[in-house]
Amino acid sequence: MIERNLLLGNGINIAFSGNDDYKNYRIIERLTKYLNTNRYDEVFQGSISSAELYEMLRQLNDGFQNMLKGVAALKWTENEDEMRTLVDIARRYNNKKQELSDIGIEDYFFVMKQFFNRVGDEATPINSLYDGLKYLFLDSIFDGGKIENLYLRMDCFAKELRKYSGIFTVNYDTNIDKLTSKPVYHLHGSFDVLDDTYRPDTIVGFIAQQKDTPPKIVDNMKHLFCNAIMGFSGKYKMDRINIYANGNMAIDNMITRLNNPLDIEAKQKYQQLERSSNPNDIFAFQSIKARLQYPELKNTEYPIKEFTSIRGELNIIGMSPNNDSHIFSLINDNPKITNVVYFSASDEDSLTAQKVIKKSVQIRNVFKYWKSLAI
């Protein structure tokens, strides 16, 4: 019997919400309302006001619109991935509205990177800027916790989940987890899992807690400090995903070598790292030292290995073929996936899916599917 696997996107939340609350435009509208309050004062520790955050969003939107006028923006791209992203954005927004709530939330990360390429400075690393923007969007997606209650409307979908051997999602909420006893693999992180920075049982968190002022979470905003990944391109997201996995492999390899009394080179390298003033070397030394002292410490890995191990049929529901190119690349590169069933929300998505997915693809109408479940 052929195995069947499931990959879910935000479309499932939109379908079961019964309204537009989790559509892109509503997420941004909700955020603008939040920015009329002092909601984020503690999160940003007074370094920036809500009014200034709102103005930042407006400037990002202005920057987005200007970016698509002519070809001048190309000179502010730093690599091929950014160039491809700019071309893709220009294609997707051609002759479409570009007001604040019309722009995809992850496309704003690209505008921020364009600004940084032009006027950024080392005093404020780009990842710190990304994190600040991510906090805002995560909070609006979380919707005061309402998104985590959608499972109460999903009884009919619980029966569907029994059909699948593997269940994967690019969503941060845990509604599907509550509908099944099977593991649900969150490829981009989850609201209920803190980022390693705030977890002392991980290498990153252990090192962070040794600092004079260790990072802290805001208790009533815990969801902001989760391990969610956001970014403007599939390559960026995949790079973030690989950081922890590659870190584990590198540390495992170094520990094995250090435990070998004949490996003099490894011991010399460890001593070099200890003496270095380079921030990357300092972190590498601290990581290895932490593992030597506490062998149970690891980086938390995203479940990419589980996803690349699936075989048979893959059903994709609620996920746009225009986003997350790294996920579609993993699908195409997996010879064990025999066919894909893509549930489409539009003719445009159907055509794009058939171009993006290099497998035998069956297109189904997602609205007819929802109707069959009596949603």
Image (cartoon, grey):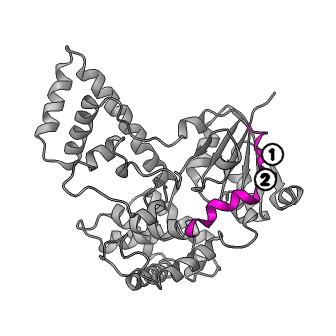
User: Mark 2 highlights which residue?
Assistant: 155
Which of the two residues, 77 or 203, is positioned nearer the viewer here? 203
**Residue at point 62% right, 69% down?**
92
* 253, above or below 334, in the image: above
Which of the two residues, 362 or 12, is positioned nearer the viewer here? 12
Tell me the quadrant of the picture where the N terminus can be found. Answer: top right
**Residue at point 36% right, 38% down?**
247
Q: Does the magenta stretch include residue 322?
A: no
Q: Residue type at mark 1: give it.
A: Lys
Inspect this view and state whether residue 74 appears. yes
Q: Do the residues labelled 2 and 1 touch (CB within 8 Å)?
A: yes
User: Mark 1 highlights which residue?
Assistant: 159
Tell me the quadrant of the picture where the C terminus can be found. Answer: bottom right
Give the side of residue 27 with respect to residue 8, left or right: left
Find the magenta span and give its range: 144-164
**Residue at point 53% right, 77% down?**
31
Q: Residue type at mark 2: give it.
A: Asp
User: In x, y percent, where is residue 135?
Assistant: 44, 66
User: In x, y percent, where is residue 293?
Assistant: 24, 30
- Local packing at callout 2 (Cα closer than 10 Å; few below 14, some 14-19, many 20+) is few
* 42, above or below 317, in the image: below
Give the side of residue 230 with respect to residue 201, left or right: right
Which of the two residues, 52 or 237, is positioned nearer the viewer here? 52
- Using the rendered view, name the quadrant where residue 285 is placed: top left
**Residue at point 74% right, 52% down?**
354
Report helix, strand or loop for mark 1. helix
Could you give the CA–CA distance between mark 2 and mark 1, rounded to whole angstroms? Answer: 7 Å
Q: Is the magenta stretch mostly helix, strand or loop?
A: helix
